[in-house]
Image: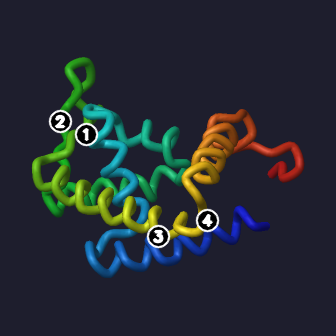
Amino acid sequence: MVISYIVLGNNAVTTRYIERRFRMPVQAWSALYAIDKFPGIRAKEIRHLFPRPQNTISRAVSLLEARGFIVQNPSDSDGREKRLVATEAGTAVLADLIEVSRQRQEELLGPLSTEERAVFFELARKIATGPDLLRSAVMRS
């Protein structure tokens, strides 16, 4: 339960701040992050990075486009398929989001020594890249 407590506590602080400061829900800023890091990504591919329902991602993409943070370009192979790209405004707001997230991470990890942080990040990386992050034998649905 300690992992859930840390994640939920951090999400509460981070999400509340970003919603107030940037008027953007978590699914929108995480989609912006994916679009910036993977120019030309399709909306349906964002689901593989941030597991959310497709309609939630579609609403986030619409919000980002309406604010001028991304553009949708038709695919060369299929005009119905849209490739997403961050605009300069989107890249700028994302830089602000990343910076405040880094500051929050420093704040959150403040009680840990440099060595403890290294161990924590290695263990977290191991869990995040493991096969059971997004599936469970115990919690089958």
Instruction: Tell me the tag on residue 32.
Output: none
Looking at the rendered image, the disc whose residue lies closer to the viewer, 4 or 1, is 4
Q: For the residue carrying disc 4, how many other residues have a C-alpha within 10 Å: few (<14), some (14-19), or many (20+)?
A: few
Identify the image quadrant of the N terminus.
bottom right
Disc 2 marks which amino acid? Asn
**In this view, 23 is above or below 73:** below
**In this view, 69 is above or below 76:** below
Disc 3 marks which amino acid? Glu
Could you say where residue 96 lies in the image, as x and y percent from the top left? 24, 61
Q: Secondary structure at mark 2?
A: strand
Measured Cα–Cα span from mark 4 to mark 2: 35 Å
**CB atoms at circles 3 and 1 under 8 Å apart?**
no
> Which residue is identified by label 1?
84
Could you say where residue 102 lies in the image, as x and y percent from the top left? 38, 59
> Which residue is identified by label 2?
73
N-terminal of the pair, mark 2 or mark 1, is: 2
Q: Secondary structure at mark 1?
A: strand
Disc 1 marks which amino acid? Leu
Measured Cα–Cα span from mark 3 to mark 1: 33 Å
**In this view, 23 is above or below 105:** below
Q: Residue at x 31, y 51 (%)?
A: 32
Looking at the rendered image, the disc whose residue lies closer to the viewer, 3 or 2, is 3
> Which residue is identified by label 3?
107
Could you say where residue 33 lies in the image, as x and y percent from the top left? 34, 49
Could you say where residue 23 lies in the image, as x and y percent from the top left? 28, 75
**CB atoms at circles 2 and 1 under 8 Å apart?**
yes
| Residue with the most extreme left position | 88
